[in-house]
Image: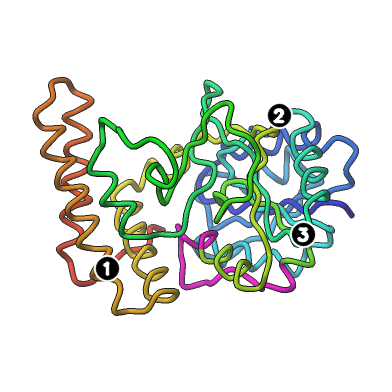
Amino acid sequence: MDLSIVIVSWNTRALLADCLGSLATACGDLTHEVLVVDNASADGSPDMVQADFPHVRLIPSGGNLGFSKGNNLAFPHTSGDFVLLLNPDTVCPAGSLAALVAFARTRDNLGVAGPMLTDAQGAPTISYGFFPRPRHHWLSFLDPGRILNKPPFQNRVVHVPAADEPSAEVEYIAGACFLMPRAALDRVGHLDERFFMYFEETDWCWRARQAGLTAWYCAEVKVAHLEGQAAARVSRFSLLQLQKSYRLFVAKNYGPHQVWKFRVAQFLEYGLKWLLRRLLPGEKNRMLAANFRDRASVQLQASVDVEIPS
């Protein structure tokens, strides 16, 4: 088996159907298997998978386990030389996954590879990023007028590549389309299940780098990521979970004593952006101001409590 594709889904029936429908042509001549871990969806997703995609292995999780636990549940059932973690809100063009696997086979000491992720209109969206550093937030004070637009000044925790940006070794790959050689998965191990959602892929890439493995962005391959649609119903949850996972990543990999530095940096970044957006006219700026205000206010909380949606 060349490729095992693992999709963790929670109430994403329509998106999941589009994703699954794109996989056969995306894989080309690759021998492949598809596993869907359903996190107790209430929208008929399991019935849809069984009726419309009988070749797909459906794994009921019994509850909303999140991204890390859901994928870990599937790993023992995979048999491919490569294992792909794929979001249900993605659509893979014809030949895309075959090309990504071919790219991965040319890289030495590979831990993970990922494509250019695009939005529904084909514009690049978040595809990879850099391990968190306080300076990422200090430098973001320049938003919306980014003057220092060259590395390392333009580096951020999340990165949207330019349309003509070449393939390159990066620090971490976005988890929406995350291709691991079997040997790398065996060497690094499963995802850390303390990350319910967000930063689990960043943490895995950190561990892969510690093991001497590399992460590669493949600009030649594009996969559509309808980012946000799968989590649109839980936007407040997403905000809180992102901050909880961010702090966990920092505490785990940099030390608990470093968390306050990131909280201060984020408070100043988002607080300034809030003030700037309030001065600008228009509904879009008003909505962005409210978002930045919420992000800044979370930094004032010593701990972040998150209620898992069911």
Marks 1 and 3: which is nearer the front? 3
Residue drawn at (29%, 47%) of the image: 139
Question: Disc 2 and disc 3: Cα gap in Å?
Answer: 21 Å
Residue 105 spot, x, y in % from top left: 83, 50
Task: Identify which amino acid the numbered label 2 is placed on.
Answer: Pro
Amino acid carrying mark 3 in the image: Pro
Kindly state the secondary structure of the residue where label 1 is placed.
loop
Residues packed near mark 3 inside 10 Å, few (<14), some (14 to 19) or many (20 plus): many
Q: Position of residue 112 (x, y in %)?
A: 67, 56
Segment tinted magenta in the rendering? 185-202
- Residue 265 in the image: state x and y as whole percent: 23, 58
Please, what is the dominant secondary structure of the magenta stretch? loop
Q: Earlier in the sequence, mark 2 or mark 1?
A: 2
Q: Earlier in the sequence, mark 2 or mark 3?
A: 2
Q: Residue at x 69, y 61 (%)?
A: 111
Disc number for residue 93:
2
Mark 3 lies on residue: 181
Within-10-Å neighbours for mark 2: few <14, some 14–19, many 20+: some
Residue 115 occupies quadrant? top right
CB contact under 8 Å: marks 2 and 3: no
Residue at 31% x, 55% y is 135
Quadrant for the C terminus, please: bottom left
Q: Given this view, does label 2 or label 1 mark the residue nearer the observer?
A: 2
Nearer-the-camera pick, 273 or 297: 273
Dot 1 surroundings within 10 Å: few (below 14), some, or many (20 or more)?
A: few
- How does the figure colour the protein chain or chains? rainbow
The answer to whether residue 122 is above or below residue 110 is: above
Q: Which residue is mark 1?
A: 305
